[in-house]
Image: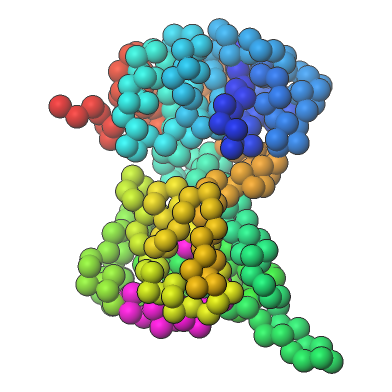
Amino acid sequence: MKIGVAKEVDAAEPRVAATPDTVKKFKALGADVAIEPGAGIKSGLLDSDYEAAGATVSAEALKDADIVVKVKRPEASEVARYKKGALVVAIMDPYGNDAALKTMADAGVAAFAMELMPRITRAQVMDVLSSQANLAGYRAVIEAAEAFGRAFPMMMTAAGTVPAAKVFVMGVGVAGLQAIATARRLGAVVTATDVRPATKEQVESLGAKFLAVEDDEFKNAQTAGGYAKEMSKEYQAKQAALTAEHIKKQDVIITTALIPGRPAPKLVTAEMVKSMKPGSVLVDLAVERGGNVEGVVSGQTAEVNGVKIIGIPNLAGRVAASASSLYSRNLLSFIETMIDKSTKALAVNWDDELVKATALTKDGAVIHPNFQPKA
């Protein structure tokens, strides 16, 4: 059994799908591991580090690989190099990318989307959304602090007092909670909002204040899987009115709201941005899905009346070494379930709930029920 570790073809992607630590664990499971040259360099990992862990470094690393591990979905030129029947495990971004799914199906590979991992106890260690969002939330605060022209903590000096920065986090998932915790560590006064009632206690446990219209719709605004439901226009209007007044007084806003498979909801309008003080900063973690902030531009820092709107895609990639370490462990934990411990051979159980939830393609067809080709 051979596992091939791909070097990302996207120059803007610094993460890697395996580390020397996970290579050792794959070897212990009976796998041969080959990695493309320079795959880990942007995460601070040298080819010699992988060789010391037992991997082969080769430009032919993916040839004849039974399993190919990547960070991002492979492009057509990459898929053409994989052997038929290979398992390809990556963050696939399948929503709205039917052509890419067809390409993988046509190539005869079995593609697995790590971000579709079910949110069950058994799969927590495989949850790439959580591992990467956690780092993105942290990095969002660091980016905001760098762009904000003042100190975050209150400072009392002989020359006068510097007030603490006011940070407002919109969307309290994994990224939002880490943003709250990081901003609090830096000394900011933090408030947060989310449509899910369960988050109120989490926000307050981190020392932040919770802001929301707490009506009947709010009390039922969470799916069984723990995701936010899309709220009614009426609720959105009430929440917008509440937050509009609050936003005027904030120094930093971090938005993290995403609904799987849909465009990011607009939380901050152009009018709200204009109401903020010059020097204020917004960081939009949903920029890759259109953004929560009106006027955000992917890959750029837009400026409106002195207010900065930061739209950095792949914030987890800004802490690539940590992100790669966590992501590679997510992959290892998932792939481990597909290997027979006694024979040390690949043995995919296609009836396993983890496999059913993540498998996109198999035997030349798109098999995931959510991504069937439209008639």
Which stretch is magenta? 239-257
Residue at the image position 42 percent from the left and 36 percent from the top: 93
Residue 257's place in the image compared with 208, above or below, is above
Query: Residue 310's quadrant in the figure?
Result: bottom right
Question: Given the current orientation, which residue lies at the most extreme left position?
Answer: 375
Residue 128's place in the image compared with 259, above or below, is above
Residue at the image position 70 percent from the left and 41 percent from the top: 321
257 left or right of 22 in image: left
Residue at the image position 31 percent from the left and 29 percent from the top: 98
Query: Residue 339's quadrant in the figure?
Result: top right
- Quarter holding the C terminus is top left
Residue 276, percent across and down? 49, 78
Can residue 169 be spotted in the picture? no
Taking depth in this image into account, of 225 and 360 the one nearest to the observer is: 360
- Count of numbered badges drawn on the protein: 0
Taking depth in this image into account, of 154 and 132 the one nearest to the observer is: 154
Whether residue 303 appears in magenta in the rendering, the answer is no
Can residue 52 be spotted in the picture? yes
Residue 144, percent across and down? 61, 64
Query: Residue 246's quadrant in the figure?
Result: bottom left
Give the color scheme: rainbow, by chain, secondary structure or one colour. rainbow
Question: Given the current orientation, which residue lies at the most extreme front position?
Answer: 305
Residue 34, percent across and down? 66, 16
Residue 99's place in the image compared with 295, above or below, is above
Residue 302, percent across and down? 51, 60
- Quarter holding the N terminus is top right
Residue at the image position 55 percent from the left and 46 percent from the top: 314
17 left or right of 369 in image: right
